[in-house]
Image (cartoon, helix red, strand yellow):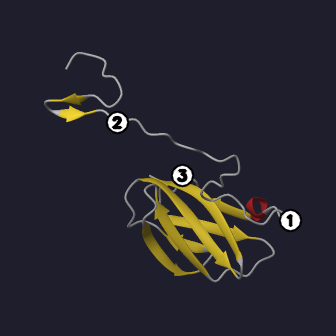
Amino acid sequence: YNGIPTSCESFTYGEVEDYIVVIPASVQSFGENTNDSDDLAARISIYPNPVNRGVLNVSILEAEPTSYAIYNVVGQVVMTGAYSDTIEVSQLQNGMYILEIESGDEKFVERFIKE
């Protein structure tokens, strides 16, 4: 209490522990394209972003999308369905979401905000 603890120190109400975190140079972030030969991000367009009327419009070039999933920022799936160029998102709470669209072996990922 009111002090700077040292590593592995014990207290009456808690303890301090040190851990080493190793982050490799080739970490792939969530939503990063795995297919380097195509620029998948340039082939998807979503609008309006932020969504404030409840309908998210999706446009994908040169692909035949089959399904979608929407994730919250914690990574939980909050909505799934068959692909449509309009997705009703009015039941989602306000916040940031990640839209993932599958088309064969390709996945398109975009972030959007629901207001």
Q: Amino acid at mark 2?
A: Glu
How far apart are labels 3 and 2 at the CA level?
41 Å
**Rendered position, 56 above or below 26:** below
How far apart are labels 3 and 1 at the CA level?
30 Å
Residue 43 location in percent, x, y? 77, 65
Please tell me which residue lies in front, 18 or 75.
18
Mark 1 falls on what kind of element? loop
**Quadrant assignment for the N terminus:** top left
Q: Which mark is residue 22?
A: none
Tell me the residue that label 3 is attached to.
50
**Rendered position, 107 above or below 45:** below
Please tell me which residue lies in front, 78 or 33.
33
Mark 2 falls on what kind of element? loop
Tell me the residue that label 1 is attached to.
37
Q: Amino acid at mark 3?
A: Pro
User: In this image, 105 relative to 18: left or right?
Assistant: right
